[in-house]
Amino acid sequence: MAMNCSPVSPKPQRVNGARSRRRRPGVASFHVDVETLPRDGGAYVLLIAIVSPVGISLPKRPDVQLAPGQYLYCGSAYGPGGIRARVARHFRKDKLVRWHVDRLTVAGRTLGAWVFPGGDECALVEILNEFPAAMPGFGASDCRRCASHLLVGPRDLAQAVWPRFLQSPKGMEG
Ligand SMILES: [Zn+2]
C-alpha cells in the first residue's frame, strides 16, 4: 500500500494504524476441533479430502467431476458467530446443501481448517497460487480477483501448505 511509504517515518509501527484490519490476518493456526475455533470474523482455508468423485455443476460452466484427493477451499465469515460458526458448519455432515462446497464436505471429510481472524479469502487464494484451481469459478462467482476459491493439491497437502503461510506474511495483506 502506497500510504506505508513515508520518508519521514521509516519505522513500520508508525503506519500500522493506517492499515485496514481486514487485510491483516494474524498468524495462521490449524484447527480440527470446533471448540478451539475463534469467534472473530475472518477468513479460513478448509482442508477437504474426498475418496470418490464428486460431480459439481456451476451456472454457465461445464460440469466437472472432482477426482478423489485433497482440496483447499478459501472462504470468509464475517457474520454472527464469526469463523467458529461457519467452520463448524463445514465440519458437520448433517446439513442441507446450500453452497457448492457443501457437496464436498458432505461427500468427503473436512480434515481441518487454517483460520485467519481479520483475514481476506482472496489474499489466501493468492498466497496458495502454486496449487491449481480445482474448478474455475468454484466459490468465486462474485469474485473478480480469483479464478477459483477451490484449489487442488498433492496427497500430503497439509505439509505443502504450511510453508506458504509461514513464508508469505506480505501476501496475506492482500
Ligand atoms: Zn477471490
Image (tube, rainbow, N blue to C red):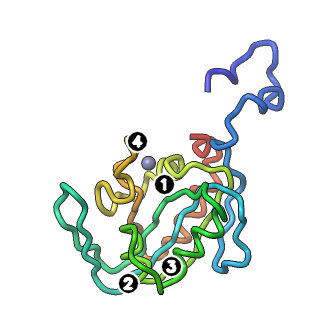
- Label 1 CB less than 8 angstroms from ligand 1: no
C-alpha gap between disc 1 and disc 4: 14 Å
Specify few, some or many for label 1: CA neighbours under 10 Å numbering under 14, 14-19, or 20 or more: some
Residue 151 falls left or right of residue 167:
left
Q: Residue at x 56, y 70 (%)?
A: 159
Q: Quadrant of the N terminus?
A: top right
Give the secondary structure at mark 2: helix
Q: Earlier in the sequence, mark 1 or mark 3?
A: 3
Q: Is residue 78 left or right of residue 137?
A: right
Residue 154 seen from this side:
no
Report the amino acid beneath label 3.
Answer: Thr
Q: CA distance from mark 2 to mark 3?
A: 10 Å
Task: Find numbered disc 3 in the image and state the secondary structure of the residue it sits on.
Answer: strand
Of marks 1 and 4, the one in the foreground:
4
Q: Is mark 4 within 8 Å of ligand 1?
A: yes
> Mark 2 highlights which residue?
107
Which mark sits nearer the N-terminus, 2 or 1? Answer: 2
Q: Which quadrant of the rendered structure holds the C terminus?
A: top right
Disc 4, SS = loop
Residue neighbourhood size for the residue with mark 3, other residues' Cα within 10 Å, grouped as few (<14), some (14–19), many (≥20): many
Depth check: give the residue in front, 91 or 115. Answer: 91
Residue tagged by mark 3? 110
Position in image of residue 22 (x %, y %): 65, 43
Query: Relative to 145, is 118 above or below?
Result: below
At x 54%, y 75%, the residue is: 89
Q: What's under tag 1, amino acid-wise?
A: Leu
Q: Amino acid at mark 2?
A: Ala
| Tag 4 residue | 145
The residues tagged by marks 1 and 3 sit, at their Cα atoms, a distance apart of 18 Å
Give the quarter of the image for residue 105: bottom left
Residue 77, given in percent of the width and then of the height, sits at 58, 58
Sequence-first disc among 3 and 4: 3
